[in-house]
Image: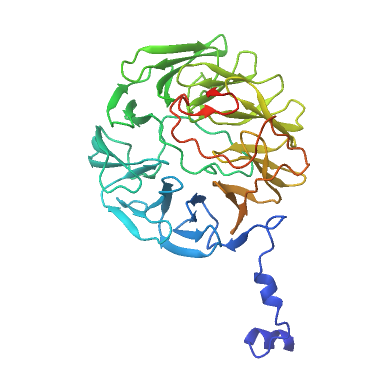
């Protein structure tokens, strides 16, 4: 008892290293990360922004050096988001129930631009869009270069939605597939789609993001749900008959409203079982949609022209898609396979457990496995291994040279390597060169500007 009292009162510490041991963080991965830091609170989101790591918490946002993990600055904020690419990122911050936002430099935290009227902000890799409303039915959308000082265009819409909305309120597009131990925003900001669908008073206002023109103002039918994907307005119909739901999808030209493609029988999982009422956006990513074919196999569709890009084999399950590849759990539940959309070609295969999750980002495909808990990042095109960690942490953010992982308040940086796989099952496609690919930001709705070097023609 005397020892306890003396130690508690500071008179004498018989165990001088005890409290250092309590405060010391255990490594969150093996092999060890480049750096590991404990942040002020459990992160709500983590984003790699150029040479910094932006950590959003409940009431504040902070930035850390990507090289060392050292804190660079901290600000009070109820929400934050990152816009811009690797060379021109910015951090957008604001407060709940307060109009306006600030655009901050990610390295210094200095304010680059301040707005006092906007009620909502949408952040993309190559654009920032905000909305300000004179009244409930009179709103203006403005598009900005992430570091720009003047809007690129403005558009008028009859409202946005009720209340003050903050960052990235929901639009009518697609929902990503969930992945265990991989954050939903692991890929960072996406390139802005060619069209955006704003839901306003039961109608959908379709806005061209290149010009700001409001191309359509459409009210869905009784059995319809509208979605804007791949430069098309999609009308998704779910009709109840004989105890079943019958689905049809119609792609519409953005300027004329004329039907450009039609496909029946694919269930996009937008409806529940009660009367085929559609309450959810379809699953997918970028320009592609995920559905279920009449025979129960999963299918990937091109939102622009309705082409069937991939249909899974019997017993296979889609884990992740973008507009290039699909990651599929094999029927034997013992491996993850990457397939190229459009051709179905197997790009790579690696062993993974039956409960493994996966995600695709521009720079890496991430596979989260169990027993043992492991995070693996590979080149999405070749399957060449970039990082292989034994860890229970989550994948929080992926950048061009590495990724941020985290567990509780601990975050750490993992640098990607360009070496060949280490012999634990990663099999790159023939001719793969490894290394980390660059992002695909300006390929167009059908990737017509991005040739695939393996095929020698446009992708």
Q: Can see residue 8?
A: yes
* Point 40% across, 35% down: residue: 192
Q: Is residue 433 left or right of residue 281?
A: right
Instruction: Residue at the far bottom: name it.
Output: 11
Comparing 327 with 265, the one in front is 327
Q: Position of residue 58 (x, y in %)?
A: 47, 56
Tell me if residue 107 comes above or below residue 319 in the rendering: below
Q: Split into 4 quadrants, where in the image is the N terminus?
A: bottom right
Q: Can see residue 56?
A: no
* Point 70% across, 34% down: residue: 428
Tell me if residue 1 comes above or below residue 378 in the rendering: below
Tell me if residue 162 comes above or below residue 303 in the rendering: below
Q: Position of residue 4 (x, y in %)?
A: 71, 84
Q: Position of residue 107 (x, y in %)?
A: 43, 59
Q: How many marks?
A: 0
Comparing 432 with 247, the one in front is 432
Instruction: Residue at the far top: name it.
Output: 242
* Point 33% across, 58% down: residue: 111
């Amino acid at each position: 008892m005397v020892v306890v009292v003396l130690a508690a009162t500071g008179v004498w510490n018989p165990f001088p290293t005890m409290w250092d041991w309590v405060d010391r963080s255990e490594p969150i991965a093996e092999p060890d990360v480049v750096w590991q830091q404990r942040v002020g609170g459990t992160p709500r989101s983590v984003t790699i922004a150029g040479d910094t790591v932006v950590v959003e918490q409940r009431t504040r946002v902070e930035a850390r050096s990507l090289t060392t993990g050292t804190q660079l600055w901290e600000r009070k904020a109820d929400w934050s988001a990152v816009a811009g690419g690797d060379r021109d990122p910015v951090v957008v911050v604001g407060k709940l129930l307060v109009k306006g936002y600030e655009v901050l430099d990610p390295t210094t935290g200095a304010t680059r631009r301040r707005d006092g009227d906007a009620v909502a902000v949408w952040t993309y890799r190559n654009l920032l869009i905000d909305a300000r409303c004179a009244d409930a039915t009179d709103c203006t959308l403005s598009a900005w270069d992430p570091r720009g000082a003047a809007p690129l265009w403005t558009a008028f819409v009859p409202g946005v939605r009720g209340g003050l909305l903050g960052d990235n309120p929901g639009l009518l597009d697609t929902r990503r597939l969930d992945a265990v131990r991989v954050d939903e925003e692991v890929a960072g900001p996406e390139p802005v789609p060619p069209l955006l669908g704003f839901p306003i008073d039961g109608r959908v206002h379709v806005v061209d993001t290149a010009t700001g023109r409001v191309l359509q103002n459409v009210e869905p039918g009784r059995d319809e749900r509208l979605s804007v994907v791949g430069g098309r307005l999609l009308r998704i119909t779910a009709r109840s008959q004989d105890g079943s739901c019958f689905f049809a999808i119609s792609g519409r030209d953005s300027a004329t409203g004329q039907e450009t493609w039609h496909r029946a029988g694919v269930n996009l999982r937008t409806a529940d079982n009660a009367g085929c009422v559609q309450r959810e956006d379809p699953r997918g990513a970028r320009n592609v949609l995920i559905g279920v074919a009449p025979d129960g196999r999963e299918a990937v569709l091109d939102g622009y022209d309705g082409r069937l890009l991939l249909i899974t084999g019997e017993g296979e399950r889609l884990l992740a898609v973008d507009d290039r590849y699909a990651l599929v759990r094999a029927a034997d539940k013992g491996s993850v396979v990457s397939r190229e959309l459009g051709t179905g070609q197997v790009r790579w295969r690696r062993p993974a457990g039956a409960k493994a999750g996966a995600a695709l980002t521009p720079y890496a495909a991430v596979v989260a496995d169990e027993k043992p808990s492991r995070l693996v990042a590979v080149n999405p095109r070749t399957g060449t291994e970039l990082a292989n960690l034994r860890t229970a942490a989550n994948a929080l953010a992926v950048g061009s040279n590495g990724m941020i992982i985290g567990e509780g308040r601990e975050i750490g940086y993992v640098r990607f390597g360009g070496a060949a796989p280490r012999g634990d099952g990663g099999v790159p496609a023939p001719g793969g060169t490894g290394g980390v690919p660059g992002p695909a930001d300006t390929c167009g709705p059908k990737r017509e500007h991005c040739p695939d070097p393996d095929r020698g023609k446009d992708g």
